């Protein structure tokens, strides 16, 4: 581990101590790196602030799991579009039938709920150009 001094504090460089784990099979391996998006950053924030169980592992997709990853990512994207389409159609019909502020708020809540439901099958993007 490398240590760096910053304004009286010592910070540990994570580059040398970071392990890489495949998000599909869970094995420690090298592969195509996963992009850190809002879902992964939210989970890492939760683990840092609430559970105090920070591991800061690198998330990758190994070569053996890449076909399965593509299938799961495609399924996630199609479900996300489907849930959002249902939510928007529901919101539109609700507002047309009963154009009140309560209906607009409930419709927005339903759209948000359906979007959150799509996250149940969440599969993050990978960085295609970077292989490690």
Image (tube, rainbow, N blue to C red):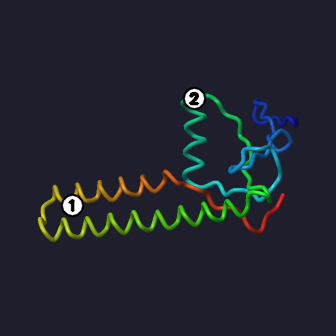
Query: 10 Å neighbourhood of mark 1: few (<14), some, or many (≥20)?
Result: some
- Indicate which disc residue 30 carries: none
Q: Is residue 65 left or right of residue 114?
A: right
Say which quarter of the image contains residue 26: top right
Q: Is residue 40 above or below residue 63?
A: above
Say which quarter of the image contains residue 34: bottom right
Location of residue 61 in the rendering, given as x and y in whole percent from the top left corner = 74, 56
Local secondary structure at mark 2: helix
Q: CA distance from mark 1 to mark 2?
A: 36 Å
Which residue is at 19% across, 65% downward? 94
Which residue is at 75% across, 30% downward? 9
Quarter of the image that includes the C terminus: bottom right
Query: 10 Å neighbourhood of mark 2: few (<14), some, or many (≥20)?
Result: few
- Indicate which disc residue 104 carries: 1
Location of residue 103 in the rendering, given as x and y in whole percent from the top left corner = 17, 59
Q: Is residue 86 left or right of residue 74?
A: left
Q: Is residue 47 left or right of residue 112?
A: right
Which residue is at 74% across, 57% downward? 65
Local secondary structure at mark 1: helix
Q: Is residue 42 above or below residue 118?
A: above
Mark 1 and mark 2 residues within 8 Å of each other at the beta carbon: no
Quarter of the image that includes the N terminus: top right
Considering only order in the chain, which callout, 2 or 1, is on the residue closer to the N terminus?
Answer: 2
Return the residue nearer the eye: 40 or 118. 118
Location of residue 119 in the rendering, given as x and y in whole percent from the top left corner = 49, 53
Q: Is residue 92 left or right of residue 64?
A: left
Q: Which residue is mark 2?
A: 51
Return the residue nearer the eye: 120 or 100. 120
Return the residue nearer the eye: 52 or 86. 86
Location of residue 75 in the rendering, given as x and y in whole percent from the top left corner = 54, 64
């Amino acid at each position: 581990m490398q240590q760096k001094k910053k304004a009286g504090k010592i910070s540990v460089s994570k580059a040398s101590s970071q392990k890489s784990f495949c998000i599909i099979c869970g094995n420690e391996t090298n592969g195509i790196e996963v992009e850190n998006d809002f879902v992964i950053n939210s989970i890492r924030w939760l683990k840092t602030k609430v559970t105090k169980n920070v591991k800061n592992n690198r998330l990758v997709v190994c070569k053996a799991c890449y076909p399965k990853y593509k299938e799961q990512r495609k399924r996630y994207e199609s479900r996300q579009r489907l849930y959002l389409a249902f939510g928007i159609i529901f919101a539109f019909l609700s507002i047309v039938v009963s154009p009140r502020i309560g209906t607009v708020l409930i419709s927005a809540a339903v759209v948000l709920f359906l979007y959150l439901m799509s996250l149940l099958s969440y599969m993050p993007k990978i960085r295609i150009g970077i292989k490690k």
